[in-house]
Each structure stands twice: as C-alpha cells, then as structure tokens.
Image (tube, grey):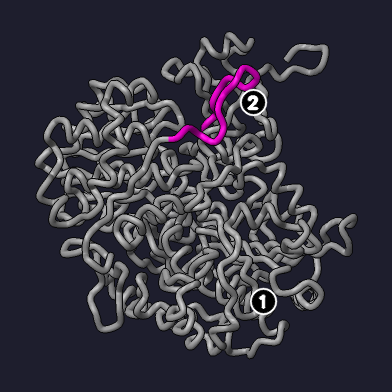
Amino acid sequence: MTTTHCPYCALQCAMHLEPGADGRLAARPAPFPTNRGGLCRKGWTSADLLTAPDRLTTPLLRADRSAPLAPTDWDTALDHVAGRLAALRAEHGPDSVAVFGGGGLTNEKSYQLGKFARVALRTAQIDYNGRFCMSSAAAAGNRAFGLDRGLPFPLTDVAGAATVLLAGANPAETMPPLMGHLSAPRLVVVDPRRSATAAYALANGGLHLAPRPGTDTALALGLLHAARAQGLCDDAYIAERTTGFAAAWPGAAAWWPEQAEHTTGVPAALIREAARALADPGGAYILTGRGTEQHAKGTDTVSAWINLALALGLPGRRGSGYGCLTGQGNGQGGREHGQKADQLPGYRRIDDPAARAHVAGVWGVDPDDLPGPGRSAYELLDALGAPGGPRALLLFGSNPVVSAPDTGRVADRLAALDLLVVADFVPSETARRADVVLPVTQWAEEDGTMTGIEGRVLRRRAAAPPPPGVRTDLEVLHGLAVRLGQPADRFSADPGAVLAELGAASAGGPADYSGVTPERLDSGEELYWPAPAGGAPTPRLFLDAFAHPDGRARFAPVAHRPPAETTDPAYPLIATTGRIMGHYQSGAQTRRIGELAAAEPAAHVEVHPDTAARNGLGDGDWALVESRRGTTRARVRHRADARLDTVFLPFHYAGDQAANNLTNPALDPVSRMPEFKVSAVRLRPDRPQGGTA
C-alpha cells in the first residue's frame, strides 16, 4: 500500500493506493486534514485512469502535416524535436520557440520546465494554464497583502468561524470533501446559479446572493457600503493595520444597497443581512473562486472582496481572513517556481535584478542571458504561427484546445505552427493535433511534491512503475536539454535532486522552499511555505504584519464596470461556464473513466423553462448555443431556479460540445485572465436542415 494524494483539485485529498486481485491499483481514502478521511467520486475512481484503454506508451511522430501520427522510438522522437527546435531558433531567434505548462505538474516539473525554457531554449515565451485559474486572485492578493498564498491559513481554521462567504465558488461539486469544513459556519454564497453549494446554504440557514453575471464588483462594493452604513467596520484595525481606505471608500460610497440591487439584482435587504453576518464576532472568512475571478475585471473584483474583508478586520487574525480556493492540483506551486511568464523560482519577479542574479547563480548562467517576461497564456496562444510570434510550441500538462477561451481561434493558431510537441499520457484533443507526442508518466507512477490549497507542500509517491516505454517529464526535459547542447548534469531527471535545486533557487524569495526536504515530509511534518532552511514553516501568514515593507495591508481603489461583452437583440442571453461533480477541467482524464463518463456523458445547458420555451426548446432537447465566436451543442436541462437571462454550461467537453467555443478572450489588464464567465449568446433548436430534432 502506498499513501499519496489525489491527482485532481488543490484540496489534494490523501489516499491509499492498493493493488487488487487483478493487479490494478484501487484508491481508498486516507486520513488527512483537508479531506478528513473522505474522497469525492473523482478521487475514488482516479486509479482507473492508469489503465485507460488509449493510454500512450510509445512516442508518436508525423512524417509531415498530411501524414498520420505513427509510433517511433524515443531517440528518433527526441532527435527530431531537438533538431527542429535548433533550426527554428537559429533562423528566427530564441523567442520563435514557446513552452506552455500546467497547474497539475509537480513542483519539480514546474521548476524544471521554467529553467528549461529560459536556459536551454533561452526563450521568454513561457506561460501555463494556471493563468486561466488563479491569476486574478494572485494579482489582487499581492496588491493587498504583498504576498499571494491561496489560503494564508490552514483549511481547518475555517470550520471555527461563524460565517463564510463564498464568492464564485461551488465546492459541493468541485471539491466535495471541503464541505465538511463548512458545516458549522453560516454560508453566504455568491453565485448567479443556484449551485449545489447555494442550495446547501439555503437549506442550512444561509444566504444565496444571485447577481447578474459580471456584476460581482458592484455587489462587493454594495456590501462594503452596507457594512459601513451599519457601523460594522473595524475602524481600529483599519487605522492600525491598513492603508488606503480613504482612497478606496469613494468607489463604494456610490453603491448603497438599493443602487447595488438595481445593477446586480440582489435584494438590498439581503445585502444588508450578508454584511451583518460577516461582522459576527464569532469570526468570518471571505473565500473567492473562479466565478468571481474569470472576468476581464477579475483583479479589481477580487480587490473589492479583499477591501470588504479589510474593512471588517478579517485578514491576519486567527479565526477570520480572506483566501482563494485554488482550482488545479498544483495551481499554487505551479506559478511559484517559473512556469509563469513574469516569475522566477520562489515567486520572484523576473524583472528584479537581484532575483535574476540569485537564480542565475544557482543555474550557473549569466543573469544577462536570462530572458525577460514574455506573453501571458492566451496572448501566447494567440501569437502562435503569426508574424513575429512563436513557430514551435512544447506543451506539458495542458489541453488548450478544450480549456482555452475561443477554442476555434486557438485551434487555428496551433495549426499555423511549424512544430507542435505535446507530452501527455492519453491522446487528448490537443495531442491529436501534434507533430510529436511524447508519452509520460501519470501521478501514481512518479515521486515529487505538490503545493495544496493551504500553501502546504505535500509528498507525491509512486505506487507502481509506469508502463514500458513511458518516461517522466523530467526525463523528457533532460533528454531534450542534452541534445540542445546543455551539460548532462544541468537538467537532472531525479525529482529529489530537482527539489534540492528548487530549494536553493527559491531561498530568500517570497515562496521559500529551501527547508523542504523529502525526509521532513516523510516524517509527517507540516511544511507550509515560506519554509526556509533552519526556520519554521508558516501555517498562518500575516498575524503580526502583512508582507509590504510597512507591514500594512493595502486597500485598492476599484470601480464597477460592465463586462467586456454585453447582450443585444442578436445575442440576448448571458452564458456562464463552470465545473460539475463528475468531471475535472478539460475532461481529458475524467471522460476516460467509465463511471464518471456514464453519469455525465454529454454536455448540457441549464435554461429556465420560460427562456427555453421562448426559443422552442423542451427539456432534453438538443440545442445550439451560439456566440459571436462559435457554437456549442448541448442538451437542454430545465432549471426553474435559473435566471431568465442566463444559461450555464460545464466546460469539460470537447469538439462541438466544448463550452469554450463560446467564451470571450478579452483579458484583465493586470492579471491577463480571460473573461470565461460572461459571453453573449443565443439559443436555437439543433435540428437537421429541413427536418425535426
């Protein structure tokens, strides 16, 4: 039996993996603070993925773009990739090659991928799919606190609060074991949709605030106005521990609850009641999720929620606080160690000369040879194959043909490349478009570390060897680096050696992992970063001071503005997207697990019955949902509790059922987060031309 952690969300539930009579591994829950001995259905079935019928076990290579992918050996595949990369770099410069990573990669892989891009390829063009996940919350957290850690406190603290507000989060479906921590507090759920979490809140004496999509900023400002008007703000805390309230208040002064109701649709009485609940002397937490963050103004919206938390005196106190519910398994560690375009290991800024000098010293290169910041994730994808853009892409741990906004545009850009290389374990929708596919190990076949929702570093342990012919991502990067002329010892394939180097590179940075070792993790020690060598880890941040030089948190002046795209007579409805219980992210993993696929085999669109009737659609009919960018095919589900102006689609499906065929790539000016959550759409029945459905 091997004890490790679930491969899916950032809750990183502990599990035992045991071989059954047929030799296949089976997952069983293990005691751990985040999951408290429980697993969701995705965790229970996670080991089935290891034996997926279409598991890749040999490299695949196209002779040319018109030829099919065909099996080849590793030396041929890596020689081909390295040769093409070298030729493109020689002809077009280092930025003609790009790298795209994922928030599910281990800390070691994330670190090595960033190092490989900047040292072996010397390209600035690297980013990862975490840009589509937590980037707005990260930008707002850094702005307010001087440091970004999803939850700056252990998750177990939340259970002791009187009130928890969840803004744009649906953990009852996306991370069900977390709900065990929310059984005691009164829940205030902010979601346009009557989600499973919102229904739970209402059934247990909580509140559901259902704003029109794209109006969360106005709602947060309205709550701050209501708190101050009712005398609920902590003036002593504001004076002693923060700065900037006077500059931020005018943004909320115009949003008295009735004005907020006019814009958001949330009744003024509920806004006042929610403000009173958050001021309960028993403590409160405000937790944000993708629903409030995945907007072209997501950073300002999260800042508005943080402003509310600061005005109530919540952050930096035991039993209260602000946090972000991280989505991907290593969404936190993935951005701390170099996959993100503007960051170096340890959450250091790539444009900081001291940071560059430190990391270059660890890597044994000249700081001047390190490239500067490159394009953000969508901007990188959008530039592929364009004049002046990258001509080759190496992709690890991501499936942007399904997960990126405006997927039709992304597919076109991938097709314009001279070379697309995908490392994956199954033929995902993106891998099928590649020129070279490299089969890599899965979560239960590798050692490494992950950083969970609380900033706690966790040990991933191999429970079984990979199939013959499969290599780890670290082995792939080592093989390519050597072929590109790097010293053989510069890119180790040993995760322990990479972790040690990561510790040295992160030492002294905001996310200091220099004290993280496999031995300490194996001993059961709880290591929350920063965890400096010779120092104690930090389970609770900001109790004494915030991370700005003066020790104070910053209010951010923000204002409500409409979504990047609004409805009109041609596209009169708003489409919003999200996750459902049975699937995870792009579905490349969960759609291959029989139990999960059978429960949710196809895309659906939730529509109010009156809205469906006006568009000629009955419950169970197939509909075409159309935006200015593309069309999604989905089966209608009537929801009497849905907003009349809003439809909801899960984004786990591919092809003509991909919700991201619709979504808007308009970007937040700070975080560069696309606006996944608001698209203007229309509905019509999906009927063959001249016939019936």
Q: Tell me, yes or no, whether the highlighted magenta stretch contains residue 585.
A: no
| Image point (62%, 73%), residue name | 117
Q: Secondary structure at mark 1?
A: loop
**From mark 2 to mark 1, how far is it between C-alphas?**
42 Å
Badge 2 element: strand
Residue at which label 1 appears? 121
Left or right of residue 537: residue 507: right
Residue 455's image quarter? bottom left
In the rendered view, tell whether residue 688 sits above or below residue 92. Answer: above
Residue at 45% of width from left, 75% of height from top? Answer: 352
Q: Residues within 10 Å of mark 2 (few under 14, many from 20)?
A: many
Label 2 or label 1, whichever lies nearer to me, is 1
> x, y percentage for residue 502?
45, 78
Q: Residue at x 31, y 51 (%)?
A: 323
**N-term-proximal mark, 2 vs 1:** 1
- In the rendered image, residue 161, in percent from the top left (x then y), is placed at 17, 44
Q: Count neighbours of disc 1 (C-alpha within 10 A) and say few if under 14, some if 14 to 19, many if 20 or more.
A: many
On screen, residue 298 versus residue 203, left or right, reads right
Q: Quadrant of the C terminus?
A: top right
Which residue lies at the image location 57% right of the left edge and 15% below the top edge? 619
Q: Is residue 180 left or right of residue 320?
A: right
Residue 593 can be seen in this image? no
The amino acid type, in three-letter code, at marker 2 is: Val
Give 518 or 167, whichever is nearer the viewer. Answer: 167
What is the span of residues highlighted in magenta in the rendered image? 561-577
From the top left corner, tell me how far across and down residue 25 is, in percent: 50, 58
Residue 163's spot in the image, x, y percent?
Answer: 20, 38
Quarter of the figure that contains the N terminus? bottom left
Residue 257 visible in the picture: yes
Q: Which residue is mark 2?
A: 625
